[in-house]
Amino acid sequence: MSTTPVAAFAEVMDTVAHLVEAVDEERWSAPTPCTGWNVQQLVDHLVAGQHTFAVAMGAEPPWPALDADPAPEALKETFRTSAAALVAAFEGPGALERTVRAPIGEVPGAVALRLQTIEHLVHGRDLAQAIGQKALFDDATVEREIEFARGLIPQLPSGPGAPFAPSRPVPENAPALDRLAALLGRDITK
């Protein structure tokens, strides 16, 4: 279990990077639990989010822009590079205290970190399911993010264009990652 939010985020990013690296060539077009996205689109989305948040945190992206249809090996490498840049941006002096512009508006860097942690936990779960793997995230980290998400969701817009679908029912004894996914609109029965 990680001792700081940034260390927990780094562990989440490492887990997702291992999942990205495990994608076989034939799985890039496989559907994911994230409606309308295949594996490549999901990974592209994560890389784009990493870029957006790294720039918001003041980092200079060390990776080139992806082609419209990048080769799988290039996407795997770009994911790992952009993930490392984002972790480094969150580790910077004063990063968690400064106000940054996120897709949901201006937030403290600490909130941006939590948003990216949740994003990678849920999409990591999506990716793992799509490629037939298990997402091995720390349950304590997931539980912390469930509590954060419960407070965040009422503050976000709902309906078309909302960042999350309406919460779905889930058994109280479901694994923490499934409870987080259901809270953010995933149907965990599929």
Image (tube, rainbow, N blue to C red):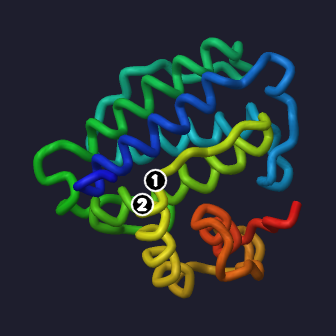
Q: Please, which residue is most extreme toward the front here?
A: 173
Q: Are marks 1 and 2 in contact (CB under 8 Å)?
A: yes
The residue carrying pointer 1 sits among few (fewer than 14), some (14 to 19) or many (20 or more) residues within 10 Å by Cα, namely some
Q: Position of residue 5 (x, y in %)?
A: 29, 57
> For the point 62% across and 45% down, which residue is it?
135
Residue at 33% x, 53% y is 1
> Foreground residue, 12 or 161?
12
Residue sticking out furthest to the left: 93
Q: CA distance from mark 1 to mark 2?
A: 5 Å
Relative to 182, does residue 138 appear above or below in the rendering?
Answer: above
Q: Which element carries disc 1, helix, strand or loop?
A: loop
Left or right side of 128 for 32: right
How far from the left and from the top, in percent, is residue 176? 58, 67
Is 152 placed above or below 42 here? Answer: below
* Residues packed near mark 2 inside 10 Å, few (<14), some (14 to 19) or many (20 plus): many
The circle on residue 138 is: 1
**Nearest the eye: 144 or 167:** 144
Q: Secondary structure at mark 2?
A: helix
- The tally of labels here is 2
Question: The C terminus lies in which quarter of the figure?
Answer: bottom right
Disc on res. 170 = none
In the image, taking residue 63 as reference, residue 43 lies left or right, namely: right
Up the image or down, 23 lies above or below 50; here it is: above
Please identify the residue farthest to the bottom as the structure is shown: 154
Kind of residue sitting beneath label 1: Asp
- Residue at position x 51%, y 50% in the image: 137
Residue type marked 2 = Thr
Measured as percent of width and height from the top left, residue 110 is found at: 28, 62
Q: Does 64 appear above or below 110?
A: above
Q: Which residue is mark 2?
A: 141
Quarter location, residue 62: top left
| Residue at point 43%, 34% (across, down) | 83
